Amino acid sequence: MTVARISAVVLSALLTTPGVAVGSSTLAASAPYVPCPAVKPPAPPPAAPSPPPVGPADLAVGGETLATAGLAIPAGASMAPSVTATSWVVADLDSGAVLGGCGPHEHRTPASVQKMLLAAALMPHLDPAQVVEVTRADLQDLDPASSLMGVVEGGRYSVESLWLGLLLKSGNDAANVLARLGGGTAGRQGGVQAMNDEAHRLGANQTHAATPSGLDGPGQYTSAYDLALIARATYARADFRRYIATRVAEIPAKPGTPGFSITHDNTLLDHYPGTLGGKTGFTDLARQTYVGVAERNGRRLAVTLLGAETAPLGSLGEAAALLDWGFALPPDASVGRLVTPDEKKKDRPITEVRGGLDGHAEAGSSFSLAAILGLGAAVVLAVLLVTASWRQRATRRAANP
């Protein structure tokens, strides 16, 4: 048998040797679907447009266990409480561990919890002592019946006062002023763009802002997981923590502008032990939404929920029940993690290649370890055989000149 034929036979045998796959760029399959424990509200919510689907790569962000439209809780954990919220997440702000969730990456409408993204995007860049004058354009598209801080056209307010009005009273007027100021020459729309840029930076792939206040706008979505990322970014700031924990704030008078006081709206402050702050939201489309943080025994847990109904518990009661469940879990419990801004936008895990229906590796998988080693061995063997053949021929020529 010639050297070439020997090498071919060896190479073929080695490459067809079965082996264990070492990796693949193929996305991990979605986690098995487990229905979320739910309680039926007394009255059905109004019909809403179906949200856009979530792509497989975005479902994988934070870990493949989170790639579900259903329930994700640690193995052996007690069952999560039944709630009306259509999606929620409980996460540890310090370790970044996701303790559990329901449809964590599913698109949902945010309502006023979107204001936290405005804070995450602009609070690092605006001087709290700067005084800004309110314009007619800041107020002209606001429903007087919506949540307002109470600023007036021509009034002059510090940026710090506007942040307090945004977070304590969920002021849509304050949101418009802050977005316009932070948007620079692009105005309010520049502020909205800054929000979307910040969502991208944080890895909040399901979040898109259309309005600075969270009032419903075209294509405006977020997810419970994204809100946990945003909460982690905002609560890392001492000024945000101070604002969000304020019970009553005095807005000082300025020439031509009367002063007034504002009181923190419905959060779990003074009602749930350890609450560090929270932000509520509601529109007919979004239903009730909530993002809050509480601390117990050195652990800071965030709860984010979307699509809740006012009865039987409301968003605040459901948030308290989810926090109780989270605090009862052991400190090392986890079903995933909150990604950090320095990671890639989409977390694409390298996973073991799973066999297809015919028992062979699925298309697009990488070589197995045995195949890789076999290829190398075949090449080495071929070189050795060729070298030996050359030496034999050289010896024969020397013996028969």
Image (cartoon, helix red, strand yellow):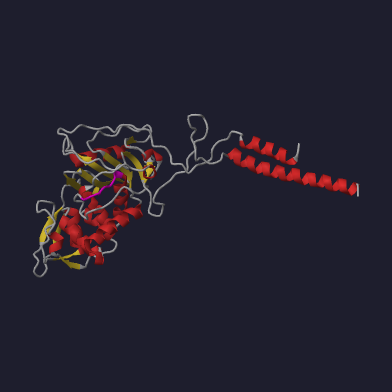
Observer-nearest of 239 and 173: 173
Is residue 27 shown left or right of residue 266?
right
Residue 165 found in image quarter: bottom left
Report the span colored magenta: 217-224
Q: Position of residue 132 (x, y in %)?
A: 18, 67
Q: Is residue 144 left or right of residue 84?
A: left
Q: Quadrant of the N terminus?
A: top right
Residue 135 percent location from the top left of the image: 14, 65
Classify 87 as above or below 118.
Answer: above
The single residue placed furthest to the bottom in the displayed view is 255
Residue 304 pos. (x, y %): 27, 44
Of the pair 260 and 6, the residue shown nearer to us: 6
Above or below, comparing residue 165 to residue 110 in the picture:
below
Q: Quadrant of residue 103?
A: top left
> How far across and down, in percent of the image, does residue 36 sit?
29, 33
Magenta segment: does it hold 187?
A: no
Q: Is residue 220 magenta?
A: yes
Q: Does residue 236 appear anywhere in the picture?
A: no
Looking at the rendered structure, the number of numbered marks drawn on it comes to: 0
Seen as rendered, the residue at the extreme top is 358
In which quadrant of the rendered view does residue 182 lie? bottom left
Left or right, 236 with reference to 136:
right
Residue 297 or 166: which is nearer the viewer?
A: 166
Task: Tell me, yes or no, if residue 242 can be seen here.
Answer: yes
> Which residue corresponds to the image point at 60% horizontal and 42% vertical from the top-left?
372
Q: What type of secondary structure mainly makes up the magenta span? A: loop
